[in-house]
Amino acid sequence: MLRLSHGQIIARVERGMDRLEQSRREVEVARWLTAEGLPVTRPLDVEQPFVVGGTVVSLWHAVDGEWTVPAELGRLLRKLHGLRPPAELSLPALDPFSRVDERIEAVQGIPDEDKAQLRTLARDLRGALQEVEYVLPTAVIHGDANIGNVLRTPEGEAVLFDLDGVCWGPPEWDLAITAVYRELGWHTDAEYEEFCQAYGFDVTQLPGYPVLRAVRELRMTCWLSQQAGDDESIAAEVSRRIQDLADPARPRLWHPY
C-alpha cells in the first residue's frame, strides 16, 4: 500500500500477476457497491487495474477517518447482504480455507510440532465445517468483515474497505468475526449486543457457531504466523494460540495485531 498525490490516492500493489483477476474483480465490486449507495472505498475512475513491473496495481481514493464501533459494521453488513450483483459481475464462492495451507507450510519460527498441529486442525475443521447448517440465505458477503475494515470519516460516514474477498457465501461467516472478537475481549458485551441489534441476528445462537469460531481463530493464527519468523514475541503468541485451538474451552488470552 503506497500513498500518492499528497496522500489523496492509495496505490495497492499486489504480490504478483496471479492477483490480476482478483484485483479486477475488486475494482468492479467497489464500483457496483458505490452505485448501490453503500459507502465503500472507491477506485479512481480510470480503466484499471494496471500491470506494472510484472505485478498488478490498482489506484483508490484514500479514506481517512477514525475507527468506529461494531454497530456501524452491523448496519453496513445488513445492507451488503441484501444486495444482488448485476449479471455481468461474476463472484466466486466462499473458500473458508483460502491461503490457510500455504501459510501453514510457509511459517517459520515455531516448533515443528506446532506446525503439525496446525495441519491437523485445518484438516479436522474442513470436515466439521461441512456439517454446519446455516439459517440465513446465501448472500454477497465481505469475507473479512472485521471492525478494522471500517472507518468513520470526518463527515460522519462509515466506509467499508478491503473488498478483495467479496464473494457468495453464508452471512454467518461475516458475522462470526465480531462474535469472536467479543469472546477474545476485543469488543465489549454491550458493543456486541449493539452489533446484533444493528444487523438483526446473533450468530452465536447458530448451533454450528463453535465451528465457525474455530475456523476464524485458525485463520487469525495462520495470518499472524507469517510474522513469526521475524519476531520472537509473535512466535510465542502463535504457539499459545495453537495450544488454545486444540482446546475450545481453554481461555483465550490473545493479543490483537
Image (tube, rainbow, N blue to C red):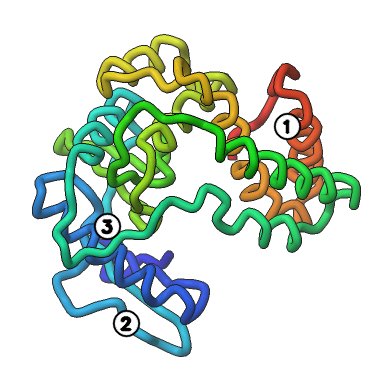
The x, y position of residue 3, in whole percent, is 36, 65
Q: Secondary structure at mark 1?
A: helix
Residue at (45%, 15%) from the top-left corner?
A: 205
Q: Which mark is residue 50?
A: 2
Residue at (47%, 14%) from the top-left corner?
A: 188
Is 198 rendered above or below residue 215? above
Which residue is the site of mark 1? Answer: 245
Please tell me which of labels 3 and 1 falls first in the chain.
3
In this view of the protein, which residue sits in the foreground, 23 or 138? 138
- Give the spatial CA distance, label 1 vs label 2: 41 Å
Q: Secondary structure at mark 3?
A: loop
Please tell me which of labels 2 and 3 falls first in the chain.
2
| Total number of numbered discs in the rendering | 3
Between disc 3 and disc 1, the foreground one is: 1
Q: Is 166 on the left-hand or right-hand side of 181? A: left
- Give the spatial CA distance, label 3 vs label 1: 37 Å
Between disc 1 and disc 2, the foreground one is: 1
The x, y position of residue 190, in whole percent, is 40, 10
Classed neighbour count for the residue bearing mark 3: other residues with Cα under 10 Å, few (<14), some (14–19), many (≥20): some
Please tell me which of labels 1 and 2 falls first in the chain.
2
Which residue is the site of mark 3? Answer: 62
Q: Amino acid at mark 2?
A: Phe
In this view of the protein, which residue sits in the foreground, 118 or 92? 92
Q: Amino acid at mark 3?
A: Ala
Quarter of image, res 189: top left
Q: Amino acid at mark 1?
A: Leu
Residue at (37%, 86%) from the top-left corner?
A: 51
Instruction: State the residue lying farthest toward the bottom.
Output: 53
Mark 1–mark 2 CB contact (< 8 Å) = no
